[in-house]
Image (cartoon, coloured by chain):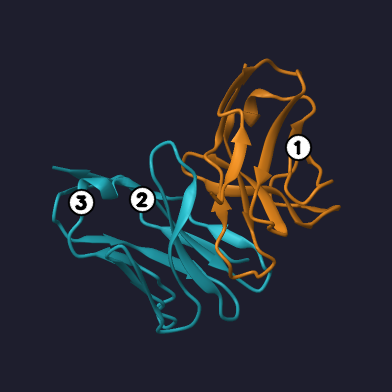
């Protein structure tokens, strides 16, 4: 089954404790992206990657890191999480064609206390 | 810059009622327009899209027409079901190549 898999689904952590949210897709997609979803703000792009070893900042990259060492994986790293990073996070992927639909994972709900 | 504005929710309807969720956009050039749907506990999935003016996207009984003169892409369905309860996002893909989402509209359909 074609899918984008994120882990974990839920995560509660404390300020300053490094964490990684994993994302993997099995559709051989070139493009991958991370979003955060907050009430009243819709989805905001954090980082994206057009292909292996190519990553770029989105609209809200501060406090996040990503890497794209393999085509299928695109982990999101919070080196020193803060409470304002409490949010619902989504990973998404698509082919290299801009108009192609984004395929989303089921989300990771992160709480930073 | 490019932007998308959706009507604020939540929208609460009875089963079989007519649905309209308004979406307007600001963009240079000729963007592609999309509606995504997010069911509870899931990620977003593409509902329909339109890539040029006067195109009509349709899927699962939902429709939206790309109106360049009014810069709108309103989502409609003639008869909603309880299973349509979800959050609906309007989005545009403009010259920057970035997909820009509206803030989302929650639809609740009651039996």
Residue A61, how many percent across, how many down?
A: 74, 44
Mark 1 = which residue?
A64
Palette colour of chain A: orange
Dividing the picture into quarters, in which one does residue B75 lie?
bottom left
**Element type at mark 3:** loop
Mark 3 = which residue?
B81
**Element type at mark 1:** loop
Residue A108, how many percent across, how many down?
A: 57, 33
Residue displayed at 69% across by 24% down: A82
Palette colour of chain B: cyan
Please state the chain letter of the residue tagged with numbered disc 1 in the rendered image.
A
Residue displayed at 66% across by 70% down: A97
Residue B28, compared with residue A108, is above or below; it is below
Mark 2 = which residue?
B8
Q: In front: mark 2 or mark 1?
A: 1
**Element type at mark 2:** loop
Please state the chain letter of the residue tagged with numbered disc 2 in the rendered image.
B
Residue displayed at 32% across by 69% down: B63
Check chain identity for marks 2 and 1: say if they share one. Answer: no
Residue displayed at 65% across by 17% down: A13
Question: Which image quarter is the C terminus of chain B in?
Answer: top left
* Observer-nearest of A14 and A84: A14
Q: Is residue B106 left or right of residue B18?
A: right
Q: Is residue A105 left or right of residue A67?
A: left
């Amino acid at each position: 089954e074609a899918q984008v898999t994120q882990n974990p689904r839920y995560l509660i952590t404390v300020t300053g404790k490094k964490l990684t949210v994993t994302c993997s897709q099995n559709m051989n997609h070139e493009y991958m992206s991370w979003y955060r979803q907050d009430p009243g703000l819709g989805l905001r792009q954090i980082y994206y990657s057009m292909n292996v070893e190519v990553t770029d900042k989105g609209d809200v990259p501060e406090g996040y890191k990503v890497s794209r060492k393999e085509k299928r994986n695109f982990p999101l790293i919070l080196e020193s999480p803060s409470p304002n990073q409490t949010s619902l996070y989504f990973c998404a992927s698509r082919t290299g064609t801009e108009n192609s639909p984004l395929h989303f994972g089921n989300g990771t709900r992160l709480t930073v206390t | 810059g490019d932007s998308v504005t959706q009507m604020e929710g939540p929208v609460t309807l009875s089963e079989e009622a007519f649905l309209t969720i308004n979406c307007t956009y600001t963009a240079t050039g000729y963007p592609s327009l999309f509606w995504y749907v997010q069911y509870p506990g899931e990620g977003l999935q593409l509902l329909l899209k339109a890539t040029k003016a006067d195109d009509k996207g349709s899927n699962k009984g939902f429709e939206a027409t790309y109106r360049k003169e009014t810069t709108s892409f309103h989502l409609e369905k003639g008869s909603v079901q309880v299973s349509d309860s979800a959050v609906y996002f309007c989005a545009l893909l403009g010259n920057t190549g970035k997909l820009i989402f509206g803030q989302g509209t929650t639809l609740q359909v009651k039996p």
